[in-house]
Image: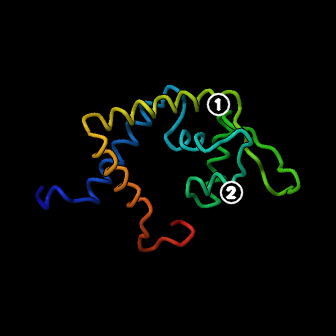
Amino acid sequence: MTQRNRRMFWLLARAHRNVAAASDERLADLGLTITQAGALFCFGEEGLLIGELGEALELAQSAASGLAKRLEDAGLVARSQEKGDGRAARLTLTTIGRQKRTEAARRAVAANTRMLQGFSEREIEVIVRWLTQVANMSMPGKSSREK
């Protein structure tokens, strides 16, 4: 492979743009963005505090609050006061949120299958290992909270 083909930042940025655009297109009929679908995947039966949602998605508190508001406005989550802490808000999936999460997950599995088509299990292990390594890298300017 030539050095020209090893432009990792450019290739990764291009892949990210293409995957995000394709995902948003594939989720449009559900009224979801890739970010909203990712947020729905974070929910368990007990729901999440807004801070927990932010932590799961590596978002600042203000971004998590904005995302929570958009999810609530879309009817995907319901907000309630956290027991024992009047300042905290717990988010739980609504019936519509659960239905859309299920369908978005089905589509994500299908997309993953398409993206990995033609690769051996060994190659897939290397791809996953590399992406995990890059995702966990400490980049200049990142705070320790974001690692």
Residue receiving disc 1: 98
Residue at far left of view: 2
Which residue lies at the image location 52% right of the left edge and 31% below the top edge?
Answer: 104
Q: Is residue 146 left or right of residue 135?
A: right
Which residue lies at the image location 67% right of the left edge and 45% below the top edge?
Answer: 69
| Relative vertical location of residue 80 with respect to residue 134 in this rendering, above or below | above
Q: Is residue 66 left or right of residue 86?
A: left
Residue receiving disc 2: 51
Mark 2 closeness class: few <14, some 14–19, many ≥20 residues within 10 Å: many
Q: Amino acid at mark 2?
A: Gly
Question: How far across and down, in percent of the image, does residue 4 sit?
Answer: 14, 59
Which residue lies at the image location 26% right of the left edge and 39% below the top edge?
Answer: 119
Question: How far across and down, in percent of the image, does residue 21 sit?
Answer: 38, 40
Question: How far across and down, in percent of the image, does residue 92 sit?
Answer: 73, 40
Question: How far across and down, in percent of the image, does residue 123 sit?
Answer: 27, 46
Q: Nearer the viewer, residue 114 or 143?
A: 114
